[in-house]
Structures are given as structure tokens and as C-alpha cells.
């Protein structure tokens, strides 16, 4: 099943047409240092959003401390904090409206799509993981927003018993007064009421094991529009990263304000 899913992803990416690529650099201080990482981090994010005949493909990867080699040794009492980390994934949507040739939606609901995603990463130098998501994506028309997209998916971790459930969403809002005053408010959230590997066989839906919430809203100023009269090329601003139960560990919350620069091609 997972090999077939990967093959489907590869086939879809070969058929993409319109696309947008961006590279962001983020710097923040105040990350939890009791999870094996340092309090201060620099993160490089690479993103690629593509549209094709039947839907979309989104690719992203976060590389923490991309220019730093910790030389970390867990046996060295003076060097216990690790900073290098790799995290990302690729997702695709298949529009039911485009596949059937008929509008699937009503009112504010503009379209419904099949959503597939593969997520993977590494941490602490010796730990890696991979998750699979499959479910539905809902495109909404909300006044004042460029786009709003919600999704409900099953979350399949090969190392966990059963599957979990996740609710997620993406949004973007742009306000422009003149070429020196253009701002963008964008971001995403993901939350899970249960993870699939529960500590309560009798009542898994109400078990607190594996619950989490993450959201990372960004406020960006379009500097490139003012300097070069080109929109969405060079943006600067802030990202607020909030994690409830970081890494799905109970009571390991994290709140960090990061400043960032984003360059799009």
C-alpha cells in the first residue's frame, strides 16, 4: 500500500504545470531545551507549490541549522544539546470537481479534493520517522482571504498501533494600500484528538495520549514590491510557532516568536 502511494506521488509530480518556489530563513530563541535541542535555532525552509490538471502538489522541507555541524556527542556532558534537524513532506490533492467535470461544492464550499501526504524527518541525529496521511481537503471562499483550505485526514505512523485522526488548515490574507504598504497574513494549523497508539483500549477517542496542536501564523511585509515593484518576491516579517504537546509529548508545550526573510521565485 505504501509503495503504491509513493508511486502515485511520483507520477503526479511529473505532470505539474504552474508552480511557485520559495526559500525562507527563520531565526528564533526560546525553544524547549529539555527535548534534546538548543534554545536558539536558525531554520531554512524550502517550499514548492504546483498546480496541475487535476489538483495541486505541495513540497516543503525545514532544515534546522543548515550551516552548522554540531559534532554532537551524547556521551559528552558538556555537549548535550543538538540543533541539526530535517523535517518535511510532500502532499497532493485530487479535485473531485476537476475529475468529474462537475462542480462539487455548495455555498462557501467551493471544492472537495482527495488529499494524500507523506511526511518524514529526523531529530537528535539518531532518530527518524515517517507518517502517511489520507483523507479529504475542502476549499472555502471566505471574504477578505486569498484562500482558506481545511482538511480531515487519517494519520498513519508505522510505529504506532492503529491510525490517528488530524484536522488541519491553511489560510492567506493580503492587504495592499500602495507599493510600499503591502502585508500578508498567512499560516497553517494541525490538531489531533487522538494518535492511534492509545493508552486506553476501552475508550481510545478520549485518551489524552498523542494529542497535539501546532500552528505557525506569519505576518509578512512585501519589501520587494516597494524596492523593485515586484510582488511576492522578497518578504520580511515574523512567524509565531505554537506547539501544544511538542512531538506528541504531554505537557511539552512550546511558544516561539521568530523573525524571517522569504524569497520567492
Image (spheres, rainbow, N blue to C red):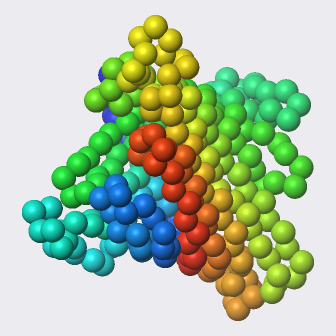
Give the residue drawn at x 29%, y 52%: 122
- Check the image and name the residue furthest to the bottom: 227
Which x, y percent locates residue 76? 12, 68
- Is 228 in front, or is 42? 42
Which x, y percent locates residue 156? 40, 28
- Check the image and name the residue furthest to the top: 202
Which x, y percent locates residue 68? 27, 77
Which x, y percent locates residue 108? 85, 35
Numbered disc total:
0
Is residue 209 among the parts visible in the rendering? yes
The image quarter containing residue 11 is top left
- Is 250 in front, or is 56? 250
Give the residue drawn at x 56%, y 72%: 258
- Is 86 in front, or is 228? 86
The image quarter containing residue 9 is top left
Up-down relation of residue 133 to residue 231 (above or below): above
The image quarter containing residue 229 is bottom right
In the image: residue 192, left or right of residue 226: left
Task: Name the quarter where the C terminus is drawn.
Answer: bottom right
In the image: residue 26, left or right of residue 81: right
Give the residue drawn at x 49%, y 61%: 47
Give the residue drawn at x 37%, y 36%: 131
Is residue 57 among the parts visible in the rendering? no
Up-down relation of residue 189 to residue 46 (above or below): above
Amino acid at each position: 500500500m505504501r509503495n503504491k502511494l509513493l508511486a502515485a506521488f511520483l507520477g503526479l509530480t511529473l505532470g505539474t504545470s504552474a508552480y511557485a518556489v520559495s526559500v525562507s530563513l527563520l531565526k528564533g530563541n526560546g525553544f524547549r531545551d529539555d527535548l534534546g535541542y538548543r534554545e536558539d535555532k536558525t531554520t531554512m525552509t524550502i517550499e514548492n507549490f504546483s498546480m496541475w490538471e487535476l489538483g495541486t502538489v505541495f513540497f516543503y522541507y525545514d532544515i534546522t541549522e543548515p550551516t552548522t555541524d554540531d559534532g554532537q556527542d551524547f556521551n559528552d556532558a558538556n555537549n548535550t544539546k543538538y540543533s541539526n534537524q530535517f523535517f518535511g513532506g510532500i502532499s497532493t490533492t485530487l479535485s473531485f470537481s476537476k475529475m468529474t467535470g462537475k462542480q462539487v461544492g455548495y455555498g462557501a464550499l467551493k471544492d472537495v479534493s482527495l488529499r494524500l501526504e507523506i511526511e518524514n524527518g529526523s531529530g537528535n541525529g539518531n532518530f527518524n520517522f515517517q507518517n502517511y496521511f489520507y483523507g479529504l481537503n475542502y476549499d472555502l471562499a471566505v471574504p477578505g482571504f486569498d484562500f482558506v483550505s481545511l482538511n480531515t485526514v487519517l494519520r498513519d505512523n508505522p510505529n504506532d498501533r492503529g491510525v490517528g485522526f488530524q484536522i488541519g488548515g491553511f489560510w492567506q490574507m493580503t492587504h495592499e494600500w500602495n507599493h510600499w504598504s503591502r502585508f500578508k497574513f498567512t499560516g497553517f494549523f494541525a490538531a489531533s484528538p487522538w494518535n492511534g497508539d492509545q493508552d486506553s483500549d476501552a475508550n481510545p477517542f478520549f485518551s489524552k495520549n498523542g494529542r497535539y496542536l501546532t500552528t505557525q501564523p506569519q505576518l509578512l511585509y512585501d519589501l520587494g514590491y516597494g524596492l523593485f515593484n515586484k510582488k511576492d518576491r522578497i518578504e520580511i516579517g515574523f512567524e509565531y510557532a505554537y506547539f501544544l504537546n511538542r512531538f506528541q509529548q504531554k505537557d511539552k508545550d512550546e511558544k516561539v516568536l521568530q523573525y524571517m526573510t522569504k524569497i520567492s521565485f
